[in-house]
C-alpha cells in the first residue's frame, strides 16, 4: 500500500528565510501579490520588511491586514472581494496560523467564488487556488505546510474543516527570527499546539512510515525547547528548534490527519473564542489519558521521543511518565481550565451535546486510536471543566 505525500513546492528554512520572498516570487513567475496579514505584523514592521524584499526585485504589492484570530466567514470576505476586484496572481501570507488560514480560504474563494461552506469537509478541494507563499511568525500551527484550513461559520458557531491540495501553500518560508518577539502566552499556546499535532499524527489511524518519521522528529525538537522558549523568548537555539519542529509537525498531521484533541478543540474555540492552541492544550492531557489503552505502544514511543521516558522503560512506565509530563507542561505554562478562561459554566454544560456532535462531524475523532461515542466525548468535556 502506498501513501501520497503532499508538501509545498518550496521550503526555505532558517534565519533570514523570509527575506527570500521576492526572489522566490519572481522565480514562480508571479508579479502581482496581495499580502494577507494582521495589524500586529504591520505594527511590528514585518510587512514593511517583506515589501522591501519585493521592491528589490521590482514587485509591487498591496496589503489586506484585516484578518482576525480564529478567522470567520465574515472576516475573510473583504479579502475575497479584494482578490475578485484586483488583478492579483498570488498571495503572500505572513503571521500566525490565522492569517495563513485566512489566505488559504481567500485564495480559493477569490478564484472560484461560492461560499466557504461549499468547500467544507467531506468535500476534498484539489483545485489549485492562487499560489500562496506562507511566512509563519509562530512556532505552532504548521499551516505553512498543510493542506488544511479552518474557518468559523459565525451563524452557527461551527469551525469548518476544509481540506485538499488546493489549500497547500506553493512555498513556505520558515524563519525562526520572526518568533523572537512572541509573547510568552502565545509561545506556550502555539508550542503545545505543535506538540499536539506531532502526537496526534503519530497515533492517528491514518499514520504512515513517512508521517511517523516527521512526527517523531518534531517531538524530539519541540519537547526539550517548549519550556525554554516560554521562559526565555530570546533563546535563539530553542526558537529555531521549536520553529522547525512545528513545521515538521505540520507536515506530519497534514499527511496523517489529527484526531480527538482537535475534534473536541474546535467547538470550544468556535463557541467560546478560545485560541486554537490553547483549547488543544486544555484537552491534550485528558484526551491522551482516554486514548492510551487503545495504543499503548504508540504513546510510549511519544514519551521516548519527547525525552521523558528512556528506552529501557516498558510501555506502561513510559505512558505514566508521559501523563505526568503533559500535566506538568500545562501547569508550568499556565494553561487555564475553561472556568479559569472565563467560560460560563451553565452555557458550557448546556452546550455539551451540540459540541460533541460537532466534534464527531468534523471527522477527526474517527482517526483516534480509541474512537469515542458522543456520550464519551461529553464525559471528557465534563472532566475538562
Image (cartoon, grey):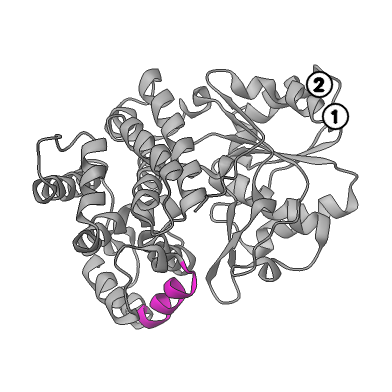
| Quarter where residue 350 is shown | bottom left
Residue 112 falls left or right of residue 143: right
* Circle 2: element type: helix
Q: Residue furthest front?
A: 1
The residue drawn where x is 86% and y is 21% is 58
72 versus 57 height, above or below: below
Q: Nearer the viewer, residue 317 or 39?
A: 317
Q: Which residue is mark 2?
A: 55
**10 Å crowding of disc 1: few (<14), some (14-19), many (20+):** some
User: Magenta region's main secondary structure?
Assistant: helix
Residue 27 seen = yes
Residue 105 falls left or right of residue 317: right
The residue drawn where x is 36% and y is 49% is 202
**10 Å crowding of disc 2: few (<14), some (14-19), many (20+):** few
The residue drawn where x is 39% and y is 43% is 212
- The segment highlighted magenta reads 352-363
370 versus 130 height, above or below: below
Q: Which residue is mark 1?
A: 60
Mark 2 and mark 1 residues within 8 Å of each other at the beta carbon: yes
Amino acid at each position: 500500500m502506498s501513501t501520497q505525500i503532499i508538501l509545498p513546492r518550496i521550503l526555505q528554512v532558517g534565519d533570514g528565510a523570509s527575506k527570500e520572498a521576492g526572489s522566490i516570487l519572481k522565480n514562480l513567475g508571479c508579479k502581482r501579490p496581495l499580502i494577507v496579514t494582521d495589524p500586529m505584523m504591520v505594527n511590528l514592521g514585518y510587512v514593511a520588511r517583506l515589501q522591501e524584499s519585493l521592491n528589490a526585485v521590482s514587485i509591487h504589492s498591496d496589503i489586506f491586514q484585516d484578518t482576525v484570530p480564529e478567522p470567520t466567514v465574515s472576516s475573510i470576505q473583504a479579502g475575497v472581494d479584494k482578490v475578485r476586484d484586483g488583478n492579483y496572481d498570488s498571495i503572500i501570507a505572513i503571521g500566525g496560523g490565522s492569517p495563513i488560514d485566512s489566505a488559504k480560504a481567500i485564495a480559493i474563494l477569490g478564484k472560484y467564488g461560492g461560499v466557504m461552506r461549499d468547500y467544507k469537509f467531506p468535500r476534498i478541494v484539489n483545485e489549485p487556488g492562487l499560489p500562496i507563499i506562507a511566512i509563519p511568525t509562530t512556532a505552532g500551527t504548521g499551516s505553512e505546510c498543510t493542506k488544511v484550513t479552518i474557518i468559523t461559520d459565525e451563524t452557527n458557531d461551527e469551525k469548518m474543516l476544509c481540506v485538499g491540495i488546493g489549500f497547500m501553500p506553493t512555498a513556505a518560508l520558515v524563519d525562526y527570527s520572526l518568533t523572537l518577539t512572541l509573547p510568552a502566552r502565545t509561545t506556550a499556546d502555539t508550542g503545545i499546539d505543535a506538540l499536539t499535532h506531532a502526537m496526534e499524527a503519530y497515533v492517528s489511524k491514518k499514520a504512515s512510515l513517512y508521517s511517523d518519521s516527521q512526527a517523531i522528529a518534531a517531538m524530539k525538537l519541540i519537547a526539550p525547547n517548549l519550556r525554554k522558549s516560554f521562559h526565555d523568548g530570546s533563546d535563539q537555539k530553542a526558537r529555531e528548534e521549536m520553529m522547525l519542529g512545528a513545521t515538521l509537525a505540520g507536515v506530519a498531521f497534514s499527511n496523517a490527519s489529527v484526531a480527538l484533541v482537535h475534534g473536541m478543540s474546535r467547538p470550544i474555540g468556535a463557541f467560546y473564542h478560545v485560541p486554537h492552541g490553547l483549547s488543544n492544550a486544555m484537552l491534550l492531557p485528558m484526551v491522551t489519558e482516554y486514548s492510551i489503552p487503545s495504543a499503548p505502544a504508540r504513546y510510549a514511543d511519544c514519551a521516548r521521543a519527547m525525552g521523558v521516558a528512556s528506552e529501557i522503560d516498558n510501555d506502561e512506565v513510559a505512558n505514566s511518565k508521559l501523563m505526568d509530563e503533559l500535566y506538568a507542561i500545562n501547569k508550568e505554562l499556565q494553561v487555564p481550565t475553561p472556568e479559569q478562561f472565563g467560560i460560563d459554566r451553565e452555557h458550557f454544560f448546556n452546550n455539551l451535546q451540540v459540541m460533541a456532535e460537532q466534534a464527531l462531524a468534523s471527522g477527526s475523532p474517527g482517526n483516534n486510536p480509541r474512537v469515542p461515542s458522543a456520550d464519551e466525548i461529553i464525559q471528557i468535556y465534563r472532566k475538562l471543566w
